[in-house]
Image (spheres, rainbow, N blue to C red):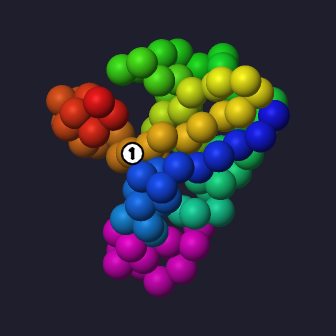
Amino acid sequence: MRIEILDEAEKDLVEGFAFYERQSNGLGDYFLDSIFSDVESLHLYAGIHGLHFGYHRLLAKRFPFAIYYRVQNNVVRVYAILDCRRNPAWVRHRLA
């Protein structure tokens, strides 16, 4: 199974990195390492997560983030990596 992180999800990662790096030097790197570990787990577990707003949603293990993805033809496409503390209406709009 191949994993693709789409441009919008990459922007989400950059924003998350910047936020955590402002909190503490080096925390942004830890954030990225943790999220990429969660994304890599999709090689084994893609498709088992519940559907939210039409996407499978994997909750990150160490940070309050959700990874929204779809599986099509043996390809996992990550559409968004969003902070779970955001308003659900904003998340729905972002994923629309």
Q: Which residue is mark 1?
A: 82
The image position of residue 2, as x and y in percent, is: 77, 40
The reply, left or right, for residue 12 in relation to residue 34 is left
Image quarter where the C terminus lies is top left
Crowd band around label 1 with a 10 angstrom C-alpha radius: few (<14), some (14–19), many (20+): many
Q: Please, which residue is most extreme toward the front here?
A: 73
Q: Secondary structure at mark 1?
A: strand
The image position of residue 76, as x and y in percent, is: 66, 34
Question: Taken as a whole, is the magenta stretch helix, strand or loop?
Answer: helix
23 is within the stretch colored magenta:
yes
The reply, left or right, for residue 58 in relation to residue 37 is left
Instruction: Give the magenta part as a residue range.
Output: 18-30
Considering only vertical position in the picture, is 80 above or below 12? above
Asked whether the viewer can see residue 45, the reply is: no
Q: How many marks?
A: 1
Q: Residue at x 41, y 61 (%)?
A: 11
Image quarter where the N terminus lies is top right
Quadrant in which residue 40 is drawn: top right
Which residue occupies the foreground of this view, 82 or 26?
A: 82
81 is within the stretch colored magenta:
no
Which residue occupies the foreground of this view, 44 or 79?
A: 79
Q: Look at label 1 and name its amino acid.
A: Leu
Quadrant in which residue 58 is drawn: top right
The reply, left or right, for residue 35 in relation to residue 45 is left
Which residue occupies the foreground of this view, 15 or 78?
A: 78
The image position of residue 23, as x and y in percent, is: 36, 74
Q: Residue at x 50, y 28 (%)?
A: 57
The image position of residue 6, as x and y in percent, is: 53, 49
The reply, left or right, for residue 71 in relation to residue 13 is right
